[in-house]
Image: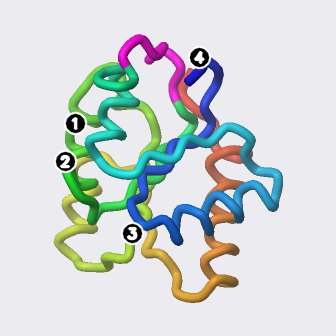
Amino acid sequence: MENTEVEIVLVEDNPHDAEMTIRALKKNNLVNKIVHLKDGAEALDFLFGTGPYEGRNTGIKPKVILLDLKMPKVDGIDVLRKLKSEASTKTIPVVVLTSSSESPDVSLCYELGANSYIVKPVGFENFSKSITDLGLYWLVLNQPLR
């Protein structure tokens, strides 16, 4: 992977959800540079420049991380915990985008430093609109820490 700006890191193990998310963002011209990582272990390697991503310029931070919770290898809660406990990554906005609306998950994610918690809507149209709105907010309206 080249060392250029990354706008969104999508951490999603469900290929269908990942494809719908990427399609909605690109269809509305909200993102050009998106990195799709398929599990929490791959996400940590990418964000910290380890494993297969060793040598990646970790000074290039995404504008936002869209993080699923229920994933193989390392789940989203552990990824969030690690990201928010490290000085180099704690200011990157993390939006939990998951199918879980369980109260303990919501509470724990906010306690760990999630910037937003969104339950994936059912149905393509609702899902697509939610992703478009999410992209507009985090990529256009939100003022990132510089």
Q: Position of residue 2 (x, y in %)?
A: 60, 19
Q: Position of residue 52 (x, y in %)?
A: 36, 25
The image's mark for residue 104 is none
State the residue position of label 4: 3
In the structure shown, which secondary structural element does the residue marked by tag 3 occupy? strand
In the structure shown, which secondary structural element does the residue marked by tag 2 occupy? helix
The image's mark for residue 82 is 1
Q: Amino acid at mark 1?
A: Lys
Magenta region: 54-61
For the residues labelled 4 and 1, the Cα–Cα distance comes to: 23 Å
Tell me if residue 59 is in the magenta stretch: yes
Is 60 situated above or below 144?
above
How many marks overall?
4
Report the side of 72 relative to 58 (left or right).
left
For the residues labelled 3 and 1, the Cα–Cα distance comes to: 18 Å
In the structure shown, which secondary structural element does the residue marked by tag 1 occupy? helix
Disc 2 vs disc 1: Cβ atoms closer than 8 Å? Answer: yes
The image's mark for residue 98 is 3
Mark nearer the N terminus (3 vs 1):
1
Tell me if residue 43 is in the magenta stretch: no
Q: Position of residue 60 (x, y in %)?
A: 53, 19
